[in-house]
């Protein structure tokens, strides 16, 4: 039995995306083309692989079995392609890249445009997700991570660090009183961003001295824009990347809480699966990311502090 690689890609995409139409968009082909390949694969293995409904598709028991083997075949194929590209120096093919929601909203658009301009044969699929997914298990090639690497295999390169700042509206600080020292923060309401671990304390720096500051969480936000809206709504203070709120700080819409104390900068990592190590695709992506972030001054380089 000869297995069609494109048909296996269609099966993996359909199960991951949850529908035939979403799989077609992901693969940049027509929906009938995906349906035809799936029908051919079902005929080749002699089993129905998907249950189709108005809500989308799910794998049958046979589909789960074929899916597992298809994912391994595609992984090995990707490793082979990466090795061949390393020999030729060619930057081409497809990369699946995951980043957190904040990065997806604020930096990835222009950065991927620059990558596309330099390397038009490299196609990047961007997945915005605050979860620290396992690259191997979820068939993702590269991740940009802030603060924590997460679990799973692969290799990591530190590409910079990100400065944070405590923020609130002037009206909120007028009402509750501006803290004069770290201990005063405990009487303010802290707005927690759920990408971070539950925080009873914030690790901060006062000059070169580390300080652990206790906070009382009054509200938890599941999304970076929700956190910012909550802070702007005057219900408490929050912690945010400095670049993300620089304009509001300059205009006076927001005020820095406890100037002179700053959250410990978060390291920024580029994490990738082992078969991409030192390949042209990975090196091209890494180069554009570092250059872009340094140019706009949003995070520091690997050894510096943010501008």
Image (cartoon, rainbow, N blue to C red):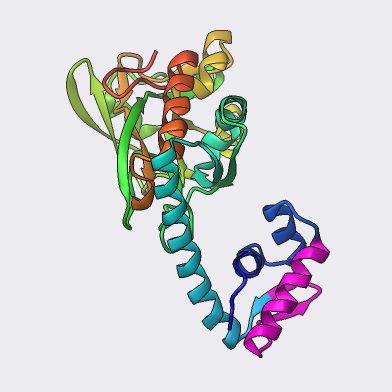
Residue projecting furthest to the bottom: 46
Residue depicted at 57% across the width and 25% down the height: 118
* Residue 48 colored in magenta in the image: yes
Asked where in the image residue 189 lies, by quadrant, the reply is top left
149 in relation to 173, above or below: below
- Horizontal side of residue 133 vs 15, given as left or right: left
Q: Which residue is drawn at 61% across and 64% down?
A: 9
Horizontal and vertical percent position of residue 259:
35, 14
Left or right of 197? Residue 104 is right
Nearest the eye: 100 or 196: 100
The residue closer to the viewer here, 67 or 218, is 67
User: Quarter of the image containing the N terminus?
Assistant: bottom right
Residue 57: image x %, image y %? 71, 74
Q: Could you tell me which residue is drawn at 75 percent across and 55 percent down?
A: 29
Residue 99 left/right relative to 304: right
Range of the magenta residues? 31-57
Q: Position of residue 61 (x, y in %)?
A: 58, 87
Could one spot residue 221 in this view of the protein?
Answer: no
Pick the quarter of the image with the C terminus.
top left
Residue depicted at x 55% and y 80%: 66
């Amino acid at each position: 039995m000869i297995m069609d690689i494109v048909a296996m890609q269609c099966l993996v995409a359909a199960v991951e995306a949850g529908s035939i139409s979403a799989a077609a968009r992901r693969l940049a082909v027509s929906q009938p083309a995906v349906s035809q390949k799936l029908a051919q694969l079902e005929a080749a293995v002699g089993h129905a692989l998907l249950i189709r409904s108005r809500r989308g598709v799910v794998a049958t028991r046979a589909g789960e079995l074929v899916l597992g083997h298809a994912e391994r075949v595609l992984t090995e194929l990707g490793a082979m392609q990466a090795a061949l590209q390393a020999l030729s120096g060619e930057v081409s093919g497809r990369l699946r890249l995951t980043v957190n929601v904040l990065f997806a909203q604020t930096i990835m658009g222009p950065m991927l445009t620059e990558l596309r301009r330099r390397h038009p044969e490299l196609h990047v699929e961007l997945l915005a997700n605050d979860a620290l997914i396992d690259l191997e298990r979820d068939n993702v090639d590269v991740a940009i991570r802030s603060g924590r690497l997460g679990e799973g295999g692969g290799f990591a390169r530190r590409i910079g660090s990100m400065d944070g700042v405590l923020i609130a509206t002037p009206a909120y600080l007028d009402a509750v009183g501006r803290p004069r020292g770290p201990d005063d923060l405990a009487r303010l309401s802290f707005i927690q961003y759920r990408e971070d671990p539950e925080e009873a304390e914030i690790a901060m720096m006062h000059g070169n001295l580390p300080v652990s500051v206790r906070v009382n969480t009054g509200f938890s936000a599941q999304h970076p824009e929700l956190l910012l809206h909550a802070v702007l709504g005057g219900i408490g203070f929050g912690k945010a990347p400095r670049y993300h709120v620089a304009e509001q700080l300059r205009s006076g819409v927001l005020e820095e809480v406890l100037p002179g104390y700053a959250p410990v900068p978060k390291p920024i990592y580029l994490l990738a699966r082992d078969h991409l190590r030192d390949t042209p695709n990975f090196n091209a992506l890494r180069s554009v990311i570092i250059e872009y972030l340094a140019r706009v001054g949003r995070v520091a380089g690997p050894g510096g502090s943010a501008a």
